[in-house]
Amino acid sequence: MAGADAELAAATGDVEEAAPLVPGPGARRAPAPPTTGAVRDVRLLSSAFLFVFLAYHAAQNLQSTVNTDENLGDISLGVLYTSFTAFSAVGSAVVRWMGSKRALAVGTSGYLLFIAANLVPSWYTMVPASLYLGFTASIIWVGQGTYLTSAALSHARENNFPEGPTLGSFNGEFWGMFASTQVIGNLISLALLRNGKDGGSVTGKNLLFAVFLGCMIVGIVLMCLLSKRDEKRDNTPTHSSFGVMLKYIIAPLKDQRMLLTIPLIAYSGLQQAFVWAVFTKSIVTPVLGISGVGGAMAIYGAADVVCSLVAGRLTSGLRSAAFIVSVGAILQAIVLFWLLLFYSPMDGLLGAAIPLFIGALWGVGDGVLNTQLSALLGLLFEDVKEAAFAQLKVWQSGAIAVIFFLSPSITLEAMLILMAASLVISFGSFLLLTLVVEKSSPVIA
């Protein structure tokens, strides 16, 4: 990531009078130290996720190409996200028991096993690896949300910064780095499989997944270098029994704010899976061929990176978040309705450019949703942040699984109608959320 260490610290405090997303103690701007433990940790965390997910995302994009026997690749991903959905309900309990740092390291093991299974793909390796990855993914993502939120709030309090801009900046840096996994991973795939068709030769494929295993190991090492954060200082309660823990997990569902956020969370999963399962197959491949998937996804990832960084820097409160989400929603709505009403594959340079342009616009929307949802949950549900991030992954991964299971059996037109309806409902629910929060918090900017 570009910029000196002081840049992120300064960015968290560059809005002197901005009100936080939710009511909190007033904060005056203070000079930022050159480097803090929280800044170091968020960059270590971002780098670890970069190495882990550049490998996983590229492998995921290739599943329908390299594991075609009896649709093994697609079915494995469907099993993975179904498992992810089921285990996400208890992910917060596991993270609370293990601590977010240990949960992050253990959670990486599932991704390592999934990549290893691709070296010897069969029903006996891929399906069990997918089931286990669903469990560890629920741990790593709850751990990520908890750890990053704890680091951001700690940084804000220690340096007398407003919490909203701090969380926005930390999430912007993390999601910007994370979005670059689509660029780097797909370029590696393109380089190692460039001489093959339908996934490349066996030798090229095995070399690719061996490189990905090396990336996974680097990611695990970086996870182990993270500082242990004192999450109890951030008002996360301890639990004496499973019953009390269960009440803690479902507590956000009793909050009107979470119920209004869930549709947008679900749509964020739908729009990600739409890119992976539908956009690459039905929009990119007919025009650019299988070899064009890597390039289109690299452009999608590059737009995601830029938007994540910009959106994170601009987040200062609920109104700014509402504006940013509105921009992303409008762009994705334009793409969906244009594909539904006007699009048809074209020859020539213009026809080849259209899928790339669509990918870039879609990446903007994905970057918006990732940064803003994480910042919103971190501030609105600070006292139950593990449970809130568990809910994020329950609804998000469930929506992803729906797309993977539906995409082989419904038409592109039906999928576009489903996506457009989901976007309208989720955006309306989000606008209602802004009214509810502003009404109960008149000091919000």
Image (cartoon, rainbow, N blue to C red):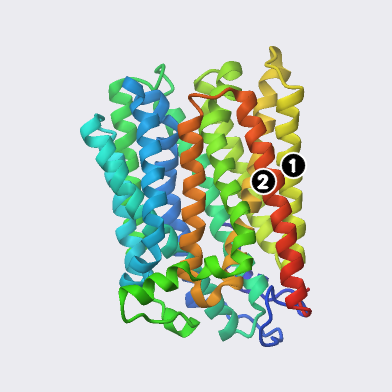
Q: For this view, does 301 lie left or right of residue 197?
A: right
> Residue 101: x percent and y percent?
36, 69
3D distance between C-alphas at marks 1 and 2: 7 Å
Above or below — where is 231 with respect to 194?
below
* Mark 1 nearby-residue class (10 Å; few <14, some 14–19, many ≥20): some
Q: For this view, does 197 lie left or right of residue 242?
A: right
Q: Going 65% across and 31% down the picture, which residue do you hit?
A: 416
Residue 102 image label: none
Residue at label 2? 365
Q: Amino acid at mark 1?
A: Leu
> Residue 334: x percent and y percent?
76, 36
Q: Quadrant of residue 108?
A: bottom left
Q: Give the structural element (helix, strand or loop) at label 2.
A: helix
The quarter of the image holding the C terminus is bottom right
Q: Give the structural element (helix, strand or loop) at label 1.
A: helix
Q: Quadrant of residue 249?
A: bottom left
> Residue 352: x percent and y percent?
66, 20
Residue at label 1? 331
Mark 1 and mark 2 lie on one chain; the one further toward the N terminus is 1
